[in-house]
Image (cartoon, rainbow, N blue to C red):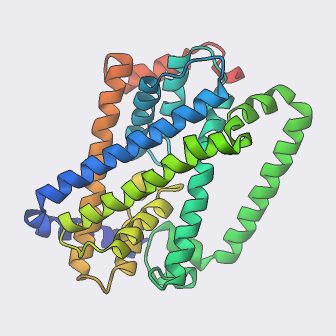
Amino acid sequence: MQDSLEQLRDAAAAYGDHFGDTRLLPLAVALLLHLLSLLVRAGVWRGILQAAFPDRRVALRSAVWSYLAGVGGNAIAPFRGGDVLRIFTIRRELGDVSVTTIVSTLVAETAFGVIVVGLMVAATVGLGWLPPIVHLPDAKAFEFSFYARHAGLVAIALAALLIAVFAAAEWAMHHLRGFWLRFTAGMRILRSPGRFARAVAAPQLVDWALRVGTAFAMLAAFGIPPGVRYAVLAVVIDSVSTALPVTPGGIGAQQGLLVFALAGVATSGQVLAYSIGAQAVIMAFNVLLGLVATFVLFGHMRMSAVRREAHAWPGLDRR
């Protein structure tokens, strides 16, 4: 951990040294593409919500602002804490609907993305673009290096977790029928392959293309050769490091993995400057979007007031 913290400090210092070299035009293009990507993702979630609540009209506006509020929360909260804000805000917009169903829409939203990320990781490792997991202990990539050093224990823990999840689901299906029905309602779109392809799979492919485009422009903005290969690598690393981050935005793990994967592309200082700079810009942009969305939804930006309203919501713990 000491080495990882030193590497993060080096990244911040390297970004400071290269701050004046940042190219504003590709940076602006990257932020525009990132915004379009977020809007596409919000549209996908809106389609999943509409399938989950066929008797309610899910306005695109409500889904977009709730999604952006969650994006802002995830930029500053570890373990994807912003998703809690997203769930609360969309329930506030839709009225007295099941929290369980809304939570399960997040599962449906990530289903296709997990497949895409898995294929991208397999492809990049197979092509030699990304180091295999056996080399990750040397990457000094925060929690990922720890996981790699203790791969056996991690595999056992994941297996135990999966068994517990399936056992809990089986028990819930037989003993908590109401809960099970509410949970499966959120994934109703998965039962309609045609609708899933139109509302989820196709837009998410567009979203992944926008993510690669964002990374391509960010590489150019921070002086890294903007090849498609390196943009794909940046997207894969970002997706892996933010899947369940211990730190907000996966900061630290992302820097370590990028330095390890892009070491032959540019100097260590350039890679560190890009990694911390690009992530800092995206995080700041996401926080700004989250604040704007919170203001639009609540008329203010006081998170303490939002928390009080969430705690006071009637029946929240029973749904």
Q: Is residue 182 left or right of residue 15?
A: right
- The residue positioned 69% from the left and 38% from the top of the image is 187
| Residue 314 vertical position relative to residue 225 in the rendered view, above or below | above
Q: Is residue 4 visible?
A: no
- The residue positioned 47% from the left and 36% from the top of the image is 43
Q: Nearer the viewer, residue 31 or 269?
A: 31
Determine which quarter of the picture holds residue 155: bottom right
Residue 57 in the image: x percent, y percent?
A: 56, 18
- The residue positioned 32% from the left and 49% from the top of the image is 34
Residue 27 in the image: x percent, y percent?
A: 19, 56
| Residue 229 vertical position relative to residue 173 in the rendered view, above or below | below
Residue 78 in the image: x percent, y percent?
A: 47, 48
Picture quarter with the C terminus: top right
Q: How many marks?
A: 0
Q: Is residue 214 left or right of residue 109?
A: left
Picture quarter with the N terminus: bottom left
Determine which quarter of the picture holds residue 315: top right
Q: Is residue 28 left or right of residue 243?
A: left
- The residue positioned 47% from the left and 62% from the top of the image is 241
Residue 79 in the image: x percent, y percent?
A: 52, 49
Q: Is residue 139 visible?
A: yes
Q: Nearer the viewer, residue 312 or 177?
A: 177
